[in-house]
Amino acid sequence: MGRIPSHRLLAILRAESEGFIRVKIEIDDDKALERIDRKIIRSNNACADQLELAISDAYKRLLFPSLSKEALNAAKEKADDAAITVFAKNLRQLLLGSPIGEKRVLAIDPGFRTGCKVVCLDENGNLKHNETIYPHAAKNDWTSALKKLASLTEAHKIEAIAIGNGTASRETEVLVRKIQFKNDVQVFVVSEAGASIYSASKIARDEFPNYDVTVRGAVSIGRRLQDPLAELVKIDAKSIGVGQYQHDVDQTKLQKQLGVVVENCVNAVGVNINTASVSLLSYVSGIGPKLAENIVNHRTENGAFSSRNSIKKVPRLGGKAFEQSAAFLRIKEAKNPLDDSSVHPESYAIVEKMAKDEGISIKELIGNKSRLQNIDLKKYYTETVGLPTLKDIVKELEKPGLDIREEAKVFTFNQNIKTINDLNEGQLLPGIVNNITNFGCFVDIGIKESGLIHVSNLSDSFVKDVNEHVHLHQQIIVKVLDVDVDRKRIQLKLHK
């Protein structure tokens, strides 16, 4: 029991719960009874036989069932912890996925019979236009679809196109790449995981009360390209589908751990308070769902916040909440440039003194690496501010508001691979890691079925942690090892 891998135990327990197998814990009964007898039976007299019978009966009826349950529960708890850790790592990587930033996006939620839903978003993710095109079977109206996409791209000054990676994704990507755009337009394939959950949620209905679920789903795809973190926090993390056996583990423990991950990611990136949704704001330290609503309502009624101090005017946002949240709430193009940094307002006076001592303005000090590195930090020690804090302040001033996430990169699948039947052993293909587990990682190679790189095929040496070799949404090259068309299984190897 102690040696079985966590994912294998969870698979066994799921099979039992579905009624396919029965799980039974076996113990060496004779050995167990012998040890108990030695502890309790002290003499070889008339009572010994009765004690032995009593021990045997108690063991079979009470002790063995209890020990079995305890052993299984302990193993299950250990497996839960391992699965939750995997999910948490994946979720963090997903939330910190590469954003394209404030660019105008045309998003497509592909489909065959029902058509492809198309939406146009401005640089802030606001919906400007939506309609449906029918380039695939049964209508096959390619010509009209090409003209419409080209027209919308030009009319809305589109800078990037996001295509959902679900049904008809490859066919839609081929269509889009046939268009001769007048300007440079980047094309991305975006994960749809959880988009349908969002589109039917109360959050989506509140955001787009006059649009149906297909429009909301397409908007979510486009916004994920602009800023994955801001959009994915609106979806229950368990619905995103990254991890292993997330529905089989302790749900309370899972929810708590995922909540911590989301909050840490939001705080690490920071939040533009003038554009952030209620969902995003609610994960900022010190701000819960109610305060987040108050912030958005205040912003709607009074306009954009001009400074961090103006945040204090939000109803019920007291001093403690401001103290906890201020450094994570950013004001773009504020009068005080520190309002768009992670420097806490409590430390503004220190930065002002640094700038004054250097004989320059705060604006001139920010980003001036040579000046900042020559500052004698000992001059700014106080009872409450020590060297670690001062070093953090200088580090932030060197690159204020720097997004810790990587920039989004354009990616293209092998255009000759359309279905699993096109695969052959030995092929080298580009792919994107779309899930990570303890036993390996799954890779999207541009067809319906994802391929598996088993942990043994990630490296020629022993792999202790899959995350040390790949990360979620990483663009990699894989080698096809085996293709089982009937079972729709693809074995891959990471190509260095």
Image (cartoon, helix red, strand yellow):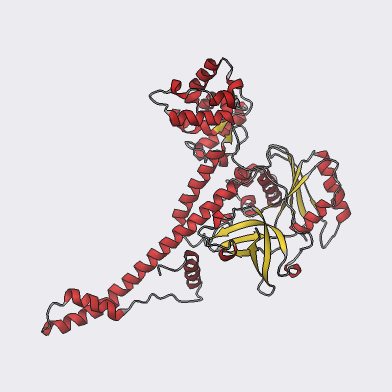
Q: Is residue 63 among the parts visible in the rendering?
A: yes
Q: Name the image quarter holding the C terminus.
A: bottom right
Image quarter of the N terminus = bottom left
Residue 438 drawn above or below residue 36: above
Image location (x, y in percent) of residue 461: 55, 62
Residue 236 in view: no
Percent across and percent down for residue 151 are 85, 44
The residue sitting at 55% across, 36% down in the picture is 293
Q: Residue at x 59, y 27 (%)?
A: 369
477 with respect to 377 (left or right):
right
Q: Is residue 367 above or below residue 245?
A: above
Along the line of sight, the residue nearer the viewer: 494 or 485? 494
Query: In the rendered picture of this protein, how many numbered marks are placed on residues?
Result: 0
- 279, above or below 437, in the image: above
With 420 as the anchor, is 293 left or right in this view? left
Point out residue 128 in the picture as x, y percentages from the top left corner: 75, 40
From what the image shows, is residue 217 above or below residue 274? below
Task: Looking at the picture, tell me which residue is in the foreground, 141 or 5.
Answer: 5
Residue 457 x, y percent position in the rendering:
60, 64
In this picture, residue 301 sits left or right of residue 465: right
